Amino acid sequence: MYNEKICSKIKKNMAMFILLFFGLTLILSACFFVAHSDHNCMDDKCMVCVQLYHCEQLVKNIAVALAFLTLGKGIVYLISHFLYFLVSFKNANKYTLIGKKIRLNI
């Protein structure tokens, strides 16, 4: 139904939106943390302390998720190259003159 160019453009725009959302979340959380890190705490249930705690947890969770995504991508990359090496090594004889059964009359 849809053109492939339109679908790829939609996917690209969605990826850019998600990247922008996470980037702004990290930047704004860090700015809030820096701006309110030295506030005067009056009681045990300080709302600023609660918000600082949530910002810190958000940044930590995003960092852990990005680390796992990077590690997963690296593992997939290594496995795919290892499998490519195995397949190309197994089929190496098929691409020679002897493997294709070509006889050279000299």
Image (spheres, rainbow, N blue to C red):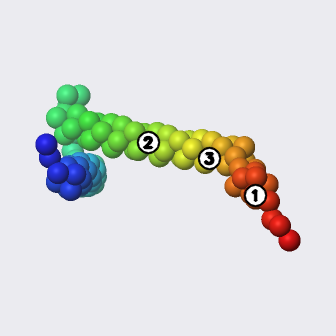
Residue closest to the eye, 79 or 54 = 79
Q: Give the structural element (helix, strand or loop) at label 3.
A: helix
Q: Does the rendering let one see residue 76?
A: yes
**Cα distance, mark 1 to mark 3?**
26 Å
Q: Residue drawn 69% across and 43% down? A: 86
Residue 106 in which image quadrant: bottom right
The numbered mark at residue 7 is none
Q: Residue furthest right?
A: 106
| Tag 1 residue | 102
Eye-nearest disc, 1 or 2: 1
Coordinates of residue 55 in the picture (x, y in percent): 27, 41
Residue closest to the eye, 76 or 42 = 76
The numbered mark at residue 69 is 2
Q: Is residue 7 left or right of residue 100?
A: left
Q: Does the rendering let one see residue 78?
A: no
Q: Give the structural element (helix, strand or loop) at label 1.
A: loop
Eye-nearest disc, 1 or 3: 1
Number of residue marks: 3
* Residue neighbourhood size for the residue with mark 3, other residues' Cα within 10 Å, grouped as few (<14), some (14–19), many (≥20): few
Looking at the rendering, in which quadrant would you find the N terminus?
Answer: top left
Residue closest to the eye, 62 or 56 = 62
**Cα distance, mark 1 to mark 2?**
48 Å
